[in-house]
Amino acid sequence: MCIAFPGEILSITEGRFAVVDIGGVRREVCLDLLADEVVPGDYVISHAGYAIQRLDEDAARESLALLKEILDHEAS
């Protein structure tokens, strides 16, 4: 099973890379696998260093809230 995380694009650098905020953690991801153009403020699902799908903000926030709930439950 693979886990992909939603995150907000903070900036786009040269060479089709973006800095993405995933639940407060910043990661650089490659944008080469995306069919759609993205801009800072957009949300993407990323896995293994690649953005694999553009995601609307509501779906991204719902996924992040669910992930936080799971992690909080595991910690208690």
Image (cartoon, helix red, strand yellow):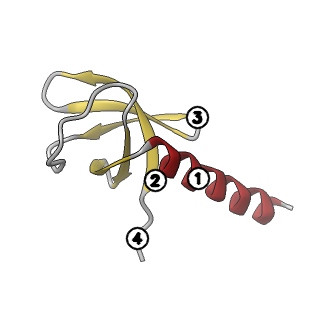
Q: Secondary structure at mark 1?
A: helix
Q: How far is the residue under mark 3 from the one under mark 1?
A: 15 Å
Helix, strand or loop at mark 2: strand
Q: What residue did someone put label 1 on?
A: 62
Given contact means CB atoms under 8 Å apart, are the residues at marks 1 and 2 in contact?
no
The residues tagged by marks 1 and 2 sit, at their Cα atoms, a distance apart of 12 Å
Q: How many marks?
A: 4
Q: Amino acid at mark 1?
A: Glu
> Where residue 58 sits: x, y (%)?
52, 46
Q: Alpha-carbon neighbours of circle 4 within 10 Å: few (<14), some, or many (≥20)?
A: few
Say which label, 3 or 1, has the lower sequence index: 3
Residue under circle 3? 24
User: Spatial distance from mark 2 to mark 4, Cα to Cα?
Assistant: 10 Å
| Quarter residue 39 falls in | top left
- Amino acid type at circle 3 is Gly
Q: Residues within 10 Å of mark 3 (few under 14, many from 20)?
A: few
Q: How far, Cα to Cα, is label 4 from label 1?
A: 19 Å
**Residue under label 2:** 5
Quadrant containing the N terminus in the rendered view: bottom left
Question: Does residue 51 appear to the left or right of 63 in the view shown?
Answer: left
Looking at the image, is mark 1 or mark 2 earlier in the sequence? 2
Q: Which residue is mark 4?
A: 2
Quarter of the image for residue 2 reads bottom left
Kindly report the distance in space between the C-alpha atoms of the residues bearing marks 4 and 3: 21 Å
Kind of element beneath mark 3: loop
Mark 4 vs 1, N-terminal side: 4
The reply, left or right, for residue 68 in relation to residue 14 is right
Q: Residues within 10 Å of mark 1 (few under 14, many from 20)?
A: few
For the residue pair 43 and 51, the one nearer the viewer reads as 43
Residue at 49 percent across and 48 percent down: it is 60
Q: Say whether disc 4 or disc 3 marks the residue closer to the N-terminus.
A: 4
Contact, mark 2 vs mark 4 (Cβ under 8 Å)? no
